[in-house]
Amino acid sequence: MDLLDNFAMFFSGLQQWLYETVVQPVFYSLGLASFLEDAYAGTAWFLVGLIQIAVLLAIIGPLERWRPVDAVTDRATIRVDILYTLIHRLGLFRLALFFMLDPLFDSGFGVLRALGLGTWHLDQVWPGVSDQALVSLAVYLVVFDFVAYWVHRGQHQIEWWWRLHSLHHAQRQMTMWSDNRNHLLDSMLVDVIVVLVAQLIGVAPGQFIAIVALTQLSESFQHANLRFWFGRVGERLWVSPRFHRLHHSIGTGHESPVNAKPSEQTEFSAGPPQGKLAPPGGSEAHAVASVGASERREGPPRASSAPPGGSEAHAVASVGATTLGGHNFGVLLPWWDMLFKTVNFEHRYDPTGIRDQLEQHRDYGRGFWSQQWLGLKRLAGRA
Ligand SMILES: [Zn+2]
Ligand SMILES: [Zn+2]
């Protein structure tokens, strides 16, 4: 706790300093004094981003060079992911969101308040216990993570949402920079949901920043090109690079009726209607479909890092475990995947990407703008 206190003091000192020496004078000289309160909060987000990028460069980067899964063959695509990271973590995206959505949020929250919602604080359910700083932080973190799990399930199982989220999965050269590689509409939607939830459960602004910062840092680590797991027990406590890489794998990671080959569609027709959130623990039709999907894994175009001769065993092993729409959707805690039976603890590192990139040479774009544009075209059913 002392360490946390010291860090909090160090952080707010830095925030104060940056605000007074740079932000405040600039805002005054531009005649934007009415935005100073928001600018003070913005300074905190900017600082969080700087600290995160420092951790990426100083710690996660060297780890990637220590035990990489894939050889780095495509530096251009990594540079685009770095651009996504800078836009999101240093506040440009948040700034745009602020100007677009803040008026909307203000009136929206006004309506909520009028309905008697949005003033409740989850951490006050058990005075003296749940409102202690660390307990309160943990409670909010678990609730946000639960929401994040279901948002991620939605991104995969609601067809139009997958058309956006697939950009994130199309990265075949995954690194610690890949977390923010998302369609801007997708990012916006997720942020709106998170802000709404924050409002409904009454998380304090300082705690909200701490939770988002911790989540983002952990997400960067999970995407690292790093052969690393937390051990039998650790894997069940916190999402590791192995855990999330499996979610990105071609095959067991994220295949679902939405992105299956047309020839398989008939098999899926016995399942629940597409575009609806399917109940966990898929029906028999899905099990059959999953076997097909696993068998099609044979001879992946890129060198698989799975042990030789292991694919058959995996095909069999994943029959029981495969659930409609893939595995390992958890963001921080693997618990929701365990609870809703979407977890896969297999220790393997398969090639990442989407099957249609290999089989139909579907193009998800190389540069930032082509990725965004193609995402819109996919959404409209034209790409
Ligand atoms: Zn996903
Ligand atoms: Zn990911």
Image (spheres, helix red, strand yellow):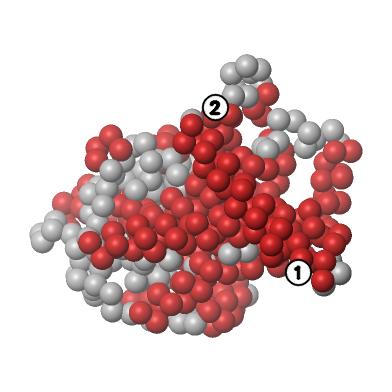
Extreme residue in the right direction? 114
The one nearer the camera, 345 or 133, is 133
Counting residues from the N terminus, which is met first, the one under dot 2 or under dot 1? 1
State whether residue 228 appears in this view: yes
Disc 2: CA contacts within 10 A as few (<14), some (14-19) or many (>=20): few
Above or below residue 25? Residue 155 is above
* Residue drawn at (50%, 48%) of the image: 215
Q: Is mark 1 within 8 Å of ligand 2?
A: no
Residue under label 2 = 135
Residue under label 1 = 26
* Left or right side of 105 for 326: left
Q: Quadrant of residue 312?
A: bottom left
Disc 1: CA contacts within 10 A as few (<14), some (14-19) or many (>=20): some
Above or below residue 108? Residue 133 is above
State whether residue 277 appears in this view: no
* Residue drawn at (64%, 27%) of the image: 123
Q: Secondary structure at mark 2?
A: helix
The one nearer the camera, 5 or 65, is 5
* Residue drawn at (76%, 66%) of the image: 25
Q: Position of residue 276 (x, y in %)?
A: 57, 51
Q: Position of residue 305 (x, y in %)?
A: 19, 63
Above or below residue 245? Residue 167 is below
Q: Position of residue 253 (x, y in %)?
A: 36, 56
- Amino acid at dot 2: Val
- Amino acid at dot 1: Val
Q: Quadrant of residue 184?
A: bottom right
* Left or right side of 133 for 76: left
